[in-house]
Image: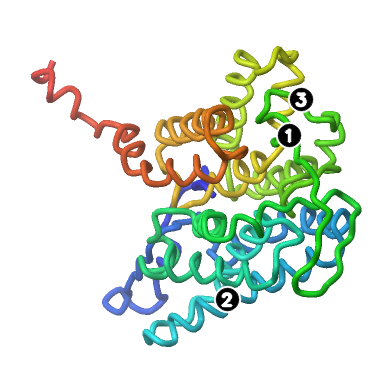
């Protein structure tokens, strides 16, 4: 999530009430949050915002989606605790960041995924993408998306079996799921999906656990905006870029508005734009940098959907833009007071 608009101070910056000579300030790594907030409080807000999507996934795909999410969250927390225990570092599981990673990773998987697959993905997310770089605030790519990309490359057959809505699956390990074409699969061939825009808005289509219902994702995003956990800049520009490009360049002779709505309401676009592109650590902190970041995410998403071998491009577009954050912040860094005047010879 990107930095709130309120004045920013280091998360762990604290001043004792003892005499001045005994006062000390402890500065932590990012994310830096507004006064009176904490990393745990922010992550709790994110979990609350994701809860409606979890409830809807249980309604559409059955209790297997809940079990899959709980296993993924437990695996993320366990790997973080174990890694830091082995390296004799302070336990950081209490900040709930590992729990958020687990929920987002589960939301990027189909309901029919074997239970061991998200455990492998959780290990990659927590150990490789997060803890090897120092933990929260020091990773340069989104851990949940990194884990999803890893399992996609390693186990494509397990993470590309889409269950239609209301086809409840058993709670056992491996299941024989009834496959269903997602809207993106039809759009890859230049065809509008069989589901209407309203059905996609409600999530009554095949797809990953937490990506199908745009309604509850937008409600969760509104909650985060009202709580000042995120601003609307990155999600709005990201979605706006996808809307503009798909409206101007529809495929297969489809009606512009219908094609644009199908792109906005299908796949993981809403989930990625609201909950993953706005990650504090892996998104720019400067307003201009955030604009460039969001535009880049939107353009890459459409390019991958149109020209790539994968039907979806959200995960890859955000990961690619994650590694460019330093450049966007460098470009977006405002000039220091008096610097421009000095360059002009003091005039």
Residue at x-position 56% and y-position 60%: 151
User: Helix, strand, or loop for circle 1?
Assistant: helix
Rounded to the nearest angstrom, the CA distance separating label 3 from label 1 is 12 Å
* Quarter of the figure with the C terminus: top left
User: Helix, strand, or loop for circle 2?
Assistant: helix
Q: Which residue is mark 1?
A: 265
Whether residue 143 sits left or right of residue 159 in the image: it is left
**Mark 1 against mark 2, which lies toward the viewer?**
1
Quarter of image, res 178: bottom right
* Mark seen at residue 76: none
Residue at x-position 42% and y-position 46%: 322
Whether residue 176 sits left or right of residue 311 in the image: it is right
Pick the front one: 225 or 336: 225
Q: What kind of colouring is applied to the model shown? A: rainbow
**Mark 3 against mark 1, which lies toward the viewer?**
3
User: Helix, strand, or loop for circle 3?
Assistant: loop
**Of callouts 2 and 3, the N-terminal one:** 2
């Amino acid at each position: 999530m990107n930095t709130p608009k309120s004045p920013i101070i280091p998360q762990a910056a604290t001043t004792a009430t003892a005499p001045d000579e005994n006062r000390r300030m402890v500065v932590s790594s990012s994310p830096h949050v507004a006064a009176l907030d904490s990393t745990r409080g922010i992550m709790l807000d994110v979990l609350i915002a994701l809860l409606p999507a979890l409830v809807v996934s249980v309604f559409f795909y059955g209790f297997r989606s809940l079990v899959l999410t709980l296993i993924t969250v437990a695996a993320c927390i366990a790997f973080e605790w174990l890694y830091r225990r082995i390296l004799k570092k302070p336990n950081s599981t209490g900040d709930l960041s590992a729990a958020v990673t687990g929920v987002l990773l589960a939301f990027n998987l189909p309901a029919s995924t074997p239970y061991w697959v998200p455990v492998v993905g959780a290990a990659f997310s927590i150990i490789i993408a997060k803890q090897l770089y120092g933990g929260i605030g020091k990773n340069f790519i989104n851990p949940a998306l990194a884990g999803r990309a890893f399992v996609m490359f390693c186990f494509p057959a397990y993470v590309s079996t889409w269950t239609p809505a209301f086809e409840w699956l058993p709670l056992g390990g491996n299941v024989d799921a009834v496959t269903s074409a997602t809207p993106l699969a039809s759009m890859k061939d230049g065809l509008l999906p069989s589901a209407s825009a309203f059905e996609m808005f409600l999530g009554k289509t095949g797809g990953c656990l937490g990506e199908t219902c745009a309604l509850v994702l937008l409600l969760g995003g509104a909650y985060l905006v009202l709580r000042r956990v995120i601003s609307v800049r990155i999600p709005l520009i990201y979605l706006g870029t996808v809307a503009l490009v798909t409206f101007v360049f529809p495929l297969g002779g489809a009606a512009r508005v219908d094609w644009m709505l199908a792109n906005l309401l299908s796949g993981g676009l809403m989930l990625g734009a609201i909950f993953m592109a706005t990650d504090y650590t892996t998104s720019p902190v400067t307003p201009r940098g955030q604009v460039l970041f969001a535009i880049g995410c939107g353009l890459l998403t459409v390019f991958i959907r149109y020209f790539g071998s994968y039907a979806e491009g959200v995960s890859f577009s955000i990961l690619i833009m994650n590694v460019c954050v330093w450049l966007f912040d460098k470009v977006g860094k405002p000039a220091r007071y008096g610097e421009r005047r000095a360059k002009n010879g003091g005039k």
